[in-house]
Amino acid sequence: MDVAPALPGPARSALHDVLGPDGLVLDPDVVGAHSTDWTGRFRGRAPALLRPADTAEVAAVVAICRDHGLPLVPQGGNTGLVGGSVPLRGELVLSLRRLDTVGAVDTLAAQVTVGAGATLAAVQQAAGRHDLRLAVDLAARDSATVGGMVATNAGGLHVVRHGAMRRHVVGHEAVLGNAGIVRHLAGLTKDNTGYDLGQLLCGSEGTLAVLTAVRLALVPVDTHHVVALCGFEQVGDAVEAVGRWRRQLPDLNAAELMSDDGVKLVAARSGRSLPLAGDPRWYVLVEAAGRHDPTDELAELVGSAPGVGDVAVALDGPRRAELWALREEHTTAINTLGPPHKLDVTLPADRLAEFCGEVRSVVAALDPRAQVWLFGHLGDGNVHVNVTGVDPHDERVDDAVLNLVARHDGSISAEHGIGTAKRRWLHLSRSTAELSAFRAIRTALDPAGILNPNVLC
């Protein structure tokens, strides 16, 4: 871990003039709280925490840092898992949390404009008053911010039906690395006037611009929900069943995979009882939701799927929440075992079962003490490979798992981006020509190279 350099006097004075005492934070305890990621695996040190209150202040901060050669790490809720929002090399932390406004919901267009620091929960609350919602949902909804979700192209629980964050961004406001402000927030359904900078910023991890506001498309609130937790002995049967359900059930909202050890860990940590008989090796939590009741259709499909064992069904809100908790509390439960290696990957559907069968052996060959926890979004091929019992800085685990993913024609990152954690393996998913194009775009929009310089490419 690098020691953070002191903030130079002229830059400090200029930043204080722009941000005031509430916006320029030098207290090492406060700054330190923003210098560690959620897992505890990535820890850095920053000379200061910058807390601008609006877009103009963000632009002024970027201009000062450009002029003084000071790198920045934009940060929202700091719920990422690849070290992408942590000042690992002494960067300043640029927190967007004060840009948390949620505008009036445009019910005619089913859209809303929000500040980058607004939490997902705040957006859902505002949209819900009009029978609308943002289709992307995360377990970290109370702390994840919209700016961070766009910057990482977050996917979450409902990608199988609604896609990732990129699909729902219809407008943007951002500050480029040269301190210029780009603003395109009308939310027009058709706007064929050249490059779509907003889409370029999705998944850019704060390397091209600092997002300050986003216009989001909303979808109607589903009035009927049904959740089923299904037991399987073979992961291949689970993959086949979800593939069938995707084809035959338009209202399929989520299909989540969990291994038995993960479910048992969650149950033990939370005091919950195991809901299925027969001690299955794999669990699939499937949710269907819509404006009409999908219960009968889901029941028929689940009942006829080969390989399904015991099933628990929930119709009312509290019972559905109990079943969902078995999936959503995986991350918290695993984190109690120490800082995990979190490898969020995507596999082709026809290779997923084979990968799940191999990955534990691959890790065990490196360290028999390691524990591998597998869960994720089965409907879109996204597996969260968590490894505990291994030194957080032992990259042999990352190397072995990510190379296995590449051999199965998968992607080394499904949801959280590349950050710092996966930078050295980006070549496994992107060609030399693609990486060259990435760097050219980055240089064009951030010529001084101050925006999150140690992530992505």
Image (spheres, grey):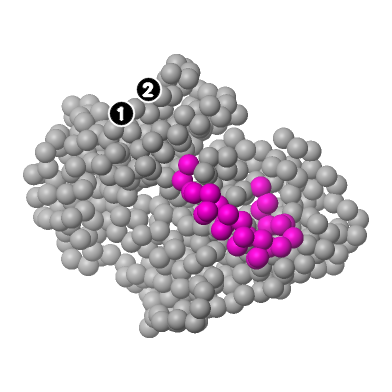
Residue at the spot of label 2: 361
Q: Please state if 362 lies on the left or on the right of 149 as rendered.
A: left
In whole angstroms, how far apart are the C-alphas of marks 2 and 1? Answer: 8 Å
The quadrant where residue 184 appears: bottom right
Residue 68 drawn above or below residue 131:
above
Q: Amino acid at mark 1?
A: Gly
Q: Point out residue 387 in the picture as x, y percentages from the top left corner.
A: 46, 29
| Residue at 51 percent of width and 62 percent of height | 202
Which residue sits at x=53%, y=26%?
Answer: 396
In the picture, measured across the screen, residue 379 lies left or right of residue 441, that is left
Task: Give the residue at x 77% y 67%.
Answer: 63
Q: Does the residue at mark 2 contact the one at mark 1 (Cβ under 8 Å)?
A: yes
Quadrant in the rendering for residue 420: top right
Residue at position x 62%, y 38% in the image = 42
Residue 399 sits above or below residue 11 on the image: above
Indicate whether 193 appears above or below 100: below
Magenta part of the protein: which range? Answer: 428-454
Report which residue position mark 1 lands on. Answer: 357
